[in-house]
Image: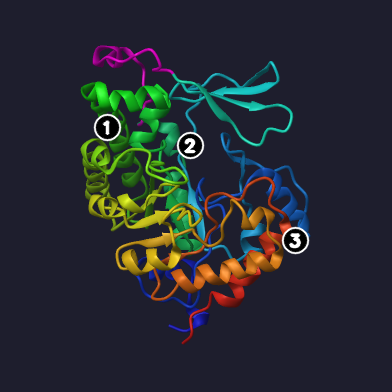
Amino acid sequence: MTSQTWTSRSRVAAALNHTEPDRVPYDLGGTILTGINRHAYRRLRQHLGLPETEPQIEDMHQQLAKVEEDVKARLKVDVWGLNPGKVPGSTPPPWTENGYHKIIDEWGIEWWMPVEGGFYFDMRRHPLEHIDTVEGLKKFKFPDPLHPARYDSMAARADELMNRRHVAYVLGRNAPGIWEIAIWMRGFENFFCDMAERPAFAEALMDIIMEIKARYWERALATVGPDVMMVSEADDLASQNACLCSPAMYRKFIKPRHTQLFAHIRKVAKAPVKIFYHSCGAVLPLLPDLIESGIDILNPVQVSAAGMDSKELKRRFGKDLTFYGGGVDTQHVLPHGTPQQVRDEVKRRVDDFAPGGGFIFNTVHNIQADVPAENILAMWEALQECGGYRR
């Protein structure tokens, strides 16, 4: 295949199958984990000389902009996104009080963002904070995964992306991960204690969430049919320096449910799918277990976290995982480095991750509000210079 015959879809497929396409595929905005904050996006459009518009919000909590087609075309974006629709009336209207914008999501979690200087919403209230019995869970109203609004136009959009535009896309999930949602609903301290002191309750809550996810994936995958390549799942399992729970706890509580859910996704899918799995942080100790559970793709590949050395990750896990992200550190280099430091970082990460395929370029998580447009362009230009495969 010559470079003139590569499409975005075939380029991504080659990378996912651990072969080398013409160049490293690039994503900006294909998921709510590989996007760009609305403030940075506005500056990027201006820097590119594109019409100034008020960004549409792709993800309210993170204040991510919807990356528009003119930006995707200018930056040769290979991966687009396909997320479920919002359920009308499932959440109360946003409101503002005491200096904060406030929202409640469909799981009942309350989020606040400062009116002055706020860049994103933070969790402030947890709906299951005072519920710690299985009987209590039975009385709680969880989201309906089969509401038709989630699937409106999903089939048409999948056909448009795969068969008309010939781009790859990630099919978005209906909620964060099994463990993550349980933590968010109970509060971090409560759920960590649940796992140690009330394991039956912790497992019951995760099983409810897993069942909701399973029903969503059944309907979503039936809706898109064979027009799918990647599906998105996530749990933030680690902090900057260590796992948030021990490997033993992961294997007892989380891994069996990951394994069951990922196997179910593959069973109900109408075409072979790759499991895109997101976990921030120093997740290295859990990677063998995550691979055994069925993940194919690791995101965001937080190269600034403990133990997450790009060269070593590729050496140890490059045959089993596609690294999706890790292209440039977003904590220090991208927001605070010079354009040349950004270019040097991109070259290093491409040199480490790209050989043999199995690499889709994106930043480490979303581009944050304080990133200069000059650094975003320096990143992209460096990828154009060093991201091609020799043939």
Q: Looking at the picture, tell me which residue is in the foreground, 242 or 149.
A: 242
Any magenta on residue 384? Answer: no
Secondary structure under tag 2 reads loop
Q: Which residue position holds label 3?
A: 48
Secondary structure under tag 3 reads loop
- How many other residues sit within 10 Å of disc 3, few (<14), some (14-19) or many (≥20)? some
Tell me if residue 76 comes above or below residue 87 in the rendering: below
Q: Looking at the picture, tell me which residue is in the foreground, 250 or 214.
A: 250
Secondary structure mostly taken by the magenta-highlighted segment of the chain:
loop
- How many other residues sit within 10 Å of disc 2, few (<14), some (14-19) or many (≥20)? some
Q: Which residue position holds label 1?
A: 211
Tell me if residue 390 comes above or below residue 235 in the rendering: below
Tell me if residue 142 comes above or below residue 146 in the rendering: above
Q: Contact (CB < 8 A) between labels 2 and 1? A: no
* Quarter occupied by residue 180: top left
Q: Looking at the image, which residue is at 51% across and 67% down? A: 349
Q: Is residue 357 left or right of residue 51?
A: left
Question: Magenta region: which residues?
Answer: 127-145
Mark before the other along the chain sequence, 2 or 3: 3
Q: Position of residue 41 (x, y in %)?
A: 68, 50
Q: Looking at the image, which residue is at 53% across and 64% down? A: 26
Q: Looking at the picture, tell me which residue is in the foreground, 72 or 345.
A: 345
- Image quarter hosting the N terminus: bottom left
Q: Which residue position holds label 2?
A: 85
Question: Spatial distance from mark 2 to mark 1, Cα to Cα?
Answer: 19 Å
Q: Looking at the image, which residue is at 38% across and 41% down? A: 235
Residue type, numbered disc 3: Leu
- Is any part of residue 228 visible from this angle? no
* Quarter occupied by residue 312: bottom left
Secondary structure under tag 1 reads helix
Question: Spatial distance from mark 1 to mark 3, Cα to Cα?
Answer: 45 Å
